[in-house]
Every structure is written in C-alpha cells, then in structure tokens.
Amino acid sequence: MISLKDYTAHDGLGLAELVARKEVTPDELGAAAFEAVAKVNPRINAVLHTIPKEAAAEIRAGLPRGPFTGVPFLIKEIVLHAKGVRCEMGSKLAQGYVPDADTELMARFRRAGFVLAGTTQTPEFGYNPTTETRAFGPVHNPWNLGHSPGGSSGGSGAAVAAGIVPIAHANDGGGSIRIPASCNGLVGLKPSRDRIPSGPDYGDLLCGLACEFALTRSVRDAAALLDAAAYAAGLADDDRTLALLTRGGCFRGQVFDPGPRGISITRWWQYRDAPQAAPQDLVAALAAAVGAPRP
C-alpha cells in the first residue's frame, strides 16, 4: 500500500510512473484518494460525490494504456458528463440529474488512463468567481479555511491543492480555471477556443468564450493532459500523433525539452493601428536575458 504522504508527494505523471513500474496498483492509488477524501473533505467541502465501487469496477475491466493510467481523477459537476455519474450543476433545480453517456472529453480522460473517483463542487450553473451554494454550502481553501478557493472550479481547485487527486477537471469562461489556480497555488491553463471538445452535449460554450480542461499540480501534467485531450474528434491513434507532429511537436515535449525559441516583440500605439517593431535595443536586451540569439 502507498501511504497518504507518498501519494500526495507525486503529481499525476509521477503516480502513473509508479503504476507502470508495478510499485503500486491503481486500486492502491484509489484507496489513497478515498482516504484523503475522508480525512480532509469534511473541512474543505470540495468533493460532492465519490464512486468507489464504480472505480474498482473500472480498474477490474482493464485500464487503457495512457499517460495517466491508474491515476484517480475528479470531475466538476457541470458541462462534462460521465455516464451514470450525477451532474447537478450546483443547483437544487438540477438535483437528481444523471447523464446516460460520456461526453467526448470524458471519453478522452478515460483513454488517458484516469480512474474516475467522484465529483467536485461548482457554484450554481458555474456563474460565480467563488464556490458557495445554497444546495451544498461553501468550499473552503485548504491553505486557509477562512479563505475562498475561487470559482467556478473551486471544488476541483481545493481538491487538487489538498492532495485528494493530482488533477481534476475544470472549465473556464471568465476565469473559472485561472482564478482557482491563483487562489490555491496550482497550474491553471485555459486552452485556446475549440482545442478541447465540449460536445456532443454542448457546442461552443458561452458563444466560444468558455473552454474545458483541468487544474493540475505541475506544468508537465497540464502539458501531458493537453496532448491527451486536444485533437480533432474521430482521429485514429496514428492520426493524433501526426497532428501533434505537424503542429510542432507535443506539448509535453516542449516542457521537457523546450530548446531554443525565437521571440517576437511588438508594440501598439492605438487600437486600430498596425503593430510596430520594438526598438532594437529592447530586442537585444530581452534576447540576452533569455539566452536567445539576437536577430
């Protein structure tokens, strides 16, 4: 068995590496996650619903080989749907709603090897930069229980910061990934529009303003997850790999081996004017600071 101390010391890729080396099993990681829920969730109120029987059944059925095989995972109760798992959107109005199918992103999370362990809080219908509802009460920041974890992905942010899971689903329209990342000391990336799928149950969320993704404890987890989730629907495995290569390599590769990069510097005088080149002395100074060759 892995201790809770050892479990919380690793990010998602680190836990997956332990599974791959057979130093720990997915069942043991799941047990650690549920132990963490029992110990800390009464104080932070981040996790709404746990599904230990379903998680065990998913492991017994055989997990896909992916970057996060065996890693426990939580989903925010809005937009993303997992088959048979409640999604009440922080509202009494939606109590009892249980989707009958996975959305495309949930399917991709499963293909990445995650084991779904439960759901996290959201403010009612996601429309709040804090996470506190009449239906379920407020979520507390694990760093300071008197502070907010932000929103609207405050449940996921608090759960990851508290070490319940290393990665949790989140989404962002006006800051709902980035605000909890700031409040909880996490990595919060809002991907570009349409890079991550929201279908088939939704189209362009908030007219394209909102995006699906996650909150993580490490940059490398965010990069690896972006690789696993960001490709056009319907692509075969070989085509996904080709898509990554043709757009400049995988995101995880950029984190581990960034190599030299060119930089582009412009300045705007007025909103409607074309950008003008920055002064050459500024270009030289910035190039020297980042170790890049001067153009």
Image (tube, rainbow, N blue to C red):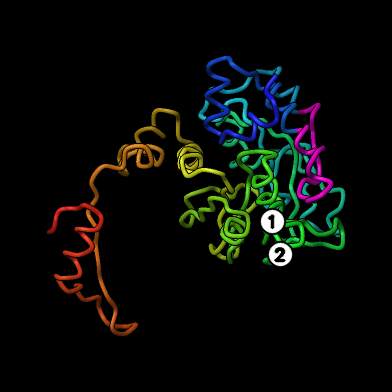
Residue drawn at x 52%, y 32% is 13
Q: In the rendered image, is residue 230 in sight? A: no
**Mark 2 and mark 1: Cα distance apart in space:** 7 Å
Q: Nearer the viewer, residue 254 or 63?
A: 254
Question: Which residue type carries mark 1?
Answer: Gly
Residue 12 in the image: above or below residue 60: below
Magenta stretch in the rendered image = 34-54
Quick one: label 2, few (<14), some, or many (20+) residues within 10 Å?
many
Relative side of 50 to 7, left or right = right
46 falls in the magenta region: yes
Residue 276 in the image: above or below residue 94: below
Q: Which residue is mark 1?
A: 154
Residue 34, image quadrant: top right
Residue 200 in the image: above or below residue 107: below
Give x and y (percent) for residue 235: 45, 35
Circles 2, 1 touching at the beta carbon (< 8 Å):
yes
Residue 5, image quadrant: top right
Q: Quadrant of the C terminus?
A: bottom left
Farthest residue toward the top?
22
